[in-house]
Amino acid sequence: MRDLPDVQNQKNSSPQIFIEKVGVKNIKVNLYIETRSKTRQHVLATINSYCSLDKNIRGINMSRMARTIYKVLEENSSEIGINDFEKLVEHLRVTNNVDNIYIKTTFDYIMNIETPITKICSLEPVTVVVENFFEDDQIHNLWTVKTTEMSLCPCSKEMSLLKNNISSEELGEIYNLSPVLQEKIFASGFGAHNQKSEIQVTVEMAKNDFLWIEDIVDIVKSSVSAPTFSVLKRPDEKWVTEVSYLGGYWDKGSFFAVGGGPRFVEDIARNVTEKLNLCLDKKILDYIVIVNNHESIHSDNITATSIITAGRRIKTQNYL
């Protein structure tokens, strides 16, 4: 076939304006993601890939980006480890002859979690976003994990506590009861409203060590009023209800403290951050924590939001 014109490489054929980001979106690929248990999980991922464009060049080779991604995945049998996405960045840099490559990969990751009491399997999907880019002469890897948990309003609980709604005569009668029964009565109330808490954690992975997706989910679930589950039997539902309200649960007359309890949106963000700080400069280099609590007692869609960052490379305004 005769030579075809390479139109996108034409120079000075359009207004001389630098383009910050140009590329392709919504490339669907099959990936095998390495898990914390050293197994592989198949995911259907969506990849967006961009680079900048010099003001003197008309366009980039769009199809070359997709072909390069497919080629790298084929050579690696579509198996991608937690830090292996940088292979795509390096190949795209070479094939497009640019430095500032940016790749965004999004997929759902399924975690097999046991319910707290009945120990049945609960398949928990979490959204994962992987961002890879070349900056300051090195490749950076950002991993975002998004999950939905439960929060219970501390103010709501305090206002509805039974001990705040009884007379002095009734209080005297309670003091005649056994200490265990007094404890149960003083901890009980008329209820408290809760929220669905959407937590988004973005971390920049270190090169020699890292947090697994499961590690980030564990941090989140241990920082809220109570974790959520896709499947619950009645004993599990009792556990979630009492843990979110009390920070533990009653069983056969004994109280088992497991953490959790009433949490503001600010409490959750700080709890997650406190745990991430233990990993900073070891397994991660930077982080941003975003918590959105979807209020349940308002007629309109009010969301309470809290954002904390380590204050390094990741910019808060990029995640609002």
Image (spheres, rainbow, N blue to C red):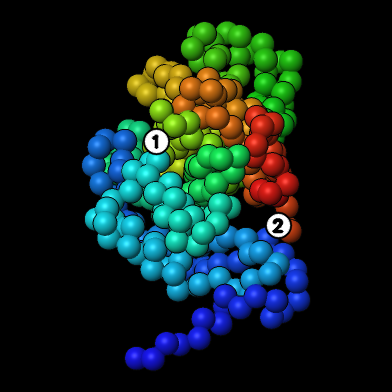
Q: Which label number is shown at residue 272?
A: none
- Residue at 23% over, 42% down: 39
- Residue at 44% over, 50% down: 90
Residue 78 is situated, as x and y percent measured from the top left of the image, at 29, 56
Q: Quadrant of the N terminus?
A: bottom left
Q: Residues within 10 Å of mark 2 (few under 14, many from 20)?
A: few
- Residue at 30% over, 43% down: 34
Q: Nearer the viewer, residue 79 or 265?
A: 79
Question: Would you name the residue on which mark 2 appears?
Answer: 301
Residue 217 is situated, as x and y percent measured from the top left of the image, at 45, 37
Disc number lying in front (2 or 1): 1
Q: Nearer the viewer, residue 9 or 180?
A: 9
Q: Nearer the viewer, residue 182 or 75?
A: 75
Amino acid type at circle 2 is Asn
Give the total of numbered labels. 2
* Res 268 visible: no
Q: What element does badge 1 sit on?
A: loop
Amino acid type at circle 1 is Trp
Residue 307 is situated, as x and y percent measured from the top left of the image, at 69, 38
* Res 290 visible: yes
Q: Is residue 75 above or below residue 186?
A: below
Q: Residues within 10 Å of mark 1 (few under 14, many from 20)?
A: some
Q: Is residue 255 left or right of residue 200?
A: left
Q: Is residue 74 left or right of residue 137?
A: left
Q: Name the quadrant containing residue 190.
A: top right
Q: What element does badge 2 sit on?
A: loop
Q: Is residue 259 above or below residue 132?
A: above
Q: Which label number is shown at residue 212?
A: 1
Q: Is residue 240 left or right of residue 290?
A: left
